[in-house]
Amino acid sequence: MKKGTYPVFLALLIASVILAVSSTPLAAAPQRGGTLNIGINTDITAIDPHTTTAAITASVMGHVYERLIGLGENLELVPVLAERWEISDDNLQITFYLRKGKLFHNGQEMTADDVKFTFDRIRTPEIKFGRKKDFADIDRIEVVDKYTVRFYMKKSNLSMLYSMAYLSPLVAVVCEDEVEKQGEKMTNPIGTGPYKFVEWKPDRHILLERFEKYVPQPGPKNGFGGERVAYLDKLKFIPITEESAATMALLNKEVDLLVYVPFGMVEQFKNNYAKKGIVLEEKTSPNWGEIQIHMQKPVVENLKFRQAMAYAIDRDIVLQAALKGHGTPHSSWVARKNAYYTPFHDKWYEKDTAKAKKLLKEAGYNGEEVNISVSKKYPMHFGIAVAVQSELQAVGINAKLKVMEWANLIKAMYGNDFEILICSHTARPDPVTAYFYMKLNGMEEKYPRMAQIKEEAAGTLDTQKRIALFEEAHQMCIDTVPSYVFYNQNIVQAWQDNVKGYTIWEAGMQRYWGVWKEK
Amino acid sequence: MLNYSIRRLLYFIPTLFIVAFMVFFLVRLIPGDPIQVMLGDGANPETIAAVREKMGLDRPLPIQFGIWLGSVVKGDFGTSIQTNRPVLQSIRERFPVTITLTTLALLFSLLLSIPTGMLAAVYRNTGKDYFFMLLTILGVSAPVFWLGLLSLLVFSVKLGWFPSIGFVPIWEDFWTGLTYLILPAVTLALHMAAVVARMTRSSMLEVLRLEYITHARAKGLGEGKVLIKHALKNAFGPTLTTIGIQYGQLLGGAVITESVFSLPGLGRYVMVSIHARDYPAVQGCILFMALIYVVINLVVDLMYTYFDPRIEYN
Amino acid sequence: MFMRKIYKNKLGLAGFIVILAFAMLALAAPWVSTHDPLKADVMNWKAPPSMDHFFGTDEYGRDIFSRVIHGTRISMYISFLSVLIATFFGVSIGAISGFYGGWIDNIIMRFMDAVMSFPAILLAIGIMAVMGGSIYNVTIALGFVYIPRFARIIRGSALSLRQKEFVEASLALGSSDFTIIFRHILPNCMAPLIVQITLSLAYAILAETGLSFLGLGAPPPAPSWGNILSDARNLMLDAPWMTVFPGIAITMCVLGFNLLGDALRDILDPRLK
Amino acid sequence: MDNILDIQDLHTFFYTPEGTAKAVNGVSLSLKPGEILGLVGESGCGKSVTNLSVLRLISDPPGKIVSGKISLDGQDLLQLPKRDMRKIRGDRISMIFQEPMISLNPAYTIGNQLMEALLTHRKISRAEAVNRVVEMLQMVEIPSAEKRLKDYPHHLSGGMRQRVMIAEAMLLRPQVLLADEPTTALDVTIQAQVLELMYKLTEEFDTAIILVTHNLGIVAESAQRVAVMYTGRVIEEAPVKDLFESPRHPYTNGLLRSVPVPDQNRPAGREPLYEIEGIVPNLFDLPSGCSFHPRCSRIKDICRHEQPPEVEVGTNHMARCWLYA
């Protein structure tokens, strides 16, 4: 996508958002009943939400379970099971006041014991909880009374609140008795959400059913917070791995909603499938795609070389190759939708071939091979790779693609075994967790200030302080080029026009409360 | 007969041991760390180490192999690293899907291949022969997944005859279940049909020259009876062996077909598990598929005696 | 005589011509192709077939025609080399096993049985997962998987030939084992061997596409046929040309090998005379 | 008495890529009820093809009955619709094959195969069929016949199998039996028994037999008449006694002289057995004129250019040779 087309695109985007918003109040009153068949692109990996980091599990199980606190529409912290919370002045005590009368699906009331149990559970070594270190600063948890629970911290770490609210893994509040009863191998997840678990037939479907005793909390629907009304009797999530097959299933009306429309197919949907009663929506998410450049590997360790790379790349080309243009160019680890975003984060290099070549010469680059590690698991990663390679080659950098399996890429990423590595990330409401990756490419080791910024930001929730810190972090990125962020990615979903009340949440989680099917 | 079966079974034990050995070490040689894949971003080394220890992944490989083999013999395939469910449970859920798919494919391919092979042999080197053989070879020549997607496009989207995704077990609702399985089974069957048709053709050709066929005709039997009763039964022996071997192709093909048609079978599970480096699941699945294959071939061996009674079991 | 028989077998002749055409295409790939098969032009993606791009462009704007042409090279390379590996090892193992018999045979055959117990593609998947994706590894994996088939054919013939008078006579005259295997046993297995070779060539091409589909084939951006086809499949509803042309190329080539193999079977198999 | 089987001027050719093989090239034979006709000649002379032609079992392609007439009891078999022809096979005309080892289907029991023809041609119950089969097996002197029904062919010895074949052939009391080298594959002692059995049965059922063989001894013992074939033609035909005592055709002469005669007691220095010079000519490339002329010791000039006609050389004695024309 060239510069010129971008505003058009933005206009389209705004139009679609307006359409989505305006259609909701105009529509007739919600109707109860029916089953919503949802095409998902990969099966959930586990039903115990604590044991997996897969976003799909968090998305599906987000209907069964609830968090203590959640993220709002704009990724701010909102109350869910905790009505409110208090933080002591020294940040070392956090007290949560729980909503009363919240029932688990087995009829038991949710109490402070369950909350304590939950947070103790995810911290035990036996449970394969993926983000244990985010909760490592908890000293102990105290049940004050039935509806009050207090966390005592070893040191100030308010980022933890974001981790609690975080999208994936889902820090679900589980029912103590039920988990004790079912043992480590959970078979029947019992939560407090608007839908209860019926069955999981792996690779066939996950079936949820409305929990009749669910009492929605007051206030408008807001992210994971606010009013959550289950109109649909059942939710049936159907994993379809083949993208074309998924589209065909939507065309055949075998699924009502498709959570992943391939970027390459968007025009086809708009031009042809719209006539068949299929609604397409597209929103820019805070998810981003980037390359990591290792600061301690030959050739790329040279700052001038990295700067040359930054000058060599036209991010529009990358955006086109990776997302077929369905994204918004962006340069920073702090996403556009993020609460701490400022225009400062738009600062970045502009493509300048002459400068790139000059810097290469200064860096003493002599045609050494530079490897771009990439996996084929996500088509957009490969798209980035193709584009970056051709851009780098154009200024004379001998870039080679090193295509590997996902598992091997992960290993390379954590094992310090890459020069340039392509990855993408889902929304990080707390930029501290985003800057985590600076640990993997040797940045922190070379520039310890980065680690300090993270530490300082984690210790406060003060917006102004945080904004300043993250701007400093971004300036460091500009100066040292540890990575190149290309874009914030769009989310494209489609559904049959009789599905009402559904709208994409940029955070990437699906929400089927407030959704109904017109008969 | 029983004696023979038992001896055949015993004969498979060393083979199975080598199979198990190969499965285990092949899977363990796969680079990548299952725990890392599973835990993703936020995992710290301590967590990873703890989980590794819990899974027994920190012990020397030969010991892990011994432990695994010991429990497999007892029917315990371990627990999936990714889903935390017993591997055997997953296999039990998925095995019926794969076995119905492959059996149906087997059935379709036999329905398609035996008559074509036979007719091609009868009309040897005529236009009809060429036509039949070309037809079946065309089926084997296109990549399965492409064929599968094309058939979805035509029969599901354009014609609306079959659903494009999903699965209903045929033991729950036979006819509905069948509609979900026909396209994938036919796609899978085409590959096998070509091979079996060729085998049928050449063994029919061989048999048709034999004197007992002339003899059967000299008795005044109708041509149909001569071909089916006298020729086919004898020609079927070699064909049967091919079918046994081809069953492996079906199982392998299921890996692809199940992905294309969104079927919850073993093949899809294997692929997901390989990508997640879910060792117990991969090991269990591949071993189980090899086991099915070996058992099918055992059955084929035993069935062979029906078609060729000259094989004595002493 | 042989060529006349091939000529008389119309389908076999057609297969032979198709294979010859693809082989020539593979050799002449750099001259026949109109673009660099790896050159991305992302802004010109999904272009339908035109005079500039005969088969259109793919999702990164690469010329599909040139990719298919170069793919011929890669697919032929994988297919021929893997079959060569399988033939070489299969024949050696089979000949040794059948010729010496006894415990050597027993051990080798148990091992071959074990390898055969895996559905071929599954074993190839496993090997690819271990070795990682590269054209060489695909070749090695497929070669390995097909070894037992060849070993079995040769072993069977070797076992029965070993009893034959001319081999015994040769042994009595003090010929070395090696000479006997190469002078007597191998020539006598040529017919089934050649048939197996042509059919395996066809299998190998298909297996490569299967591996690519599963994400375990030759790593992109190498324009192997499997890559071209499996990459394009997600856009097949929108840009059919992306799958149609490579699909037809694969089907034609495999069909060619199959027809040739079948014809050879008819011609060479003495039992069918 | 009328002929039961009458073959007139039969031509059966095989069309192959190598050329046209005139396997049967103008054969005429006739057979009276209960009569045994010996059909002798070297292999490849067209004896078996003649037999198969009678049943119309020549595989087409490559073979084809080009012309001629084969009448069974006055009915021209070559004009019959396929379906009617099938009714004759195994019922009115049956056949015994040369190799009992390969002419029985290994995949079915003896009983199954024996009853097949019976159940095809006669409307009788299974039980009745079993009875008749057992009865027949007893007639061909197979011990514990009932048990044998459940045996597979590979359970039986060669002699036993040939008895089964004979039993099967005679089961429907055919008018004509085509026996193609019925004893060649058997041990000498068994041969005699099997032949004896065949004669016994023909006498009982008045079946006519064409006995195809290259064994002149067998012919001498059993046939009433003998026809000698060479390259697709009958070159001499005569009552058995005449033929053996005064063979007219040089080929017949040669054949007879090449058979060792046991009662001529010539201990040492005995004359070596006669051998016909040369080889049987290639069917694709028959010599011009009399096809035997290249091997003939009494060749005349005309032999090289023209086919010899049939010549009446004695009572019921015919020879195709220029010596007598």
Image: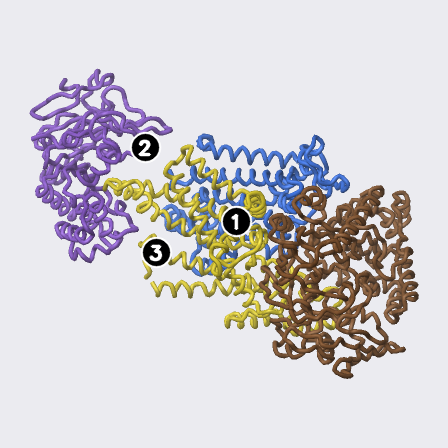
- Reading the image, the residue beneath label 3 is B305
Whole-angstrom CA distance, mark 2 to mark 3, is 33 Å
- Reading the image, the residue beneath label 1 is B183
Q: What amino acid does circle 2 point to?
A: Asp
Task: Tell me the number on the disc at residue C80.
Answer: none
Compared across the picture, whether A309 is left or right of A514 comes to right
Describe the element under mark 1 as helix, strand or loop. helix
**The C terminus of chain D: image quadrant:** top left
Q: Colour of chain C?
A: blue
Q: Colour of chain A?
A: brown
**The N terminus of chain D: image quadrant:** top left
Tell me, yes or no, whether dots 1 and 2 are on the same chain.
no
Q: Chain of mark 1?
A: B
Tell me, yes or no, whether dots 1 and 3 are on the same chain.
yes
Count neighbours of disc 1 (C-alpha within 10 A) and say few if under 14, some if 14 to 19, many if 20 or more: many
Whole-angstrom CA distance, mark 1 to mark 2, is 41 Å
- Reading the image, the residue beneath label 2 is D60
Describe the element under mark 2 as helix, strand or loop. loop
Compared across the picture, whether D47 is left or right of B175 comes to left
Whole-angstrom CA distance, mark 1 to mark 3, is 34 Å
Q: Chain of mark 3?
A: B
Q: Earlier in the sequence, mark 1 or mark 3?
A: 1
Viewer-nearest residue: A146 or A366: A146
Q: Is residue A45 above or below residue C207?
A: below
Q: What amino acid does circle 3 point to?
A: Thr
Residue A141 coordinates in the image, percent (x, y): 77, 80
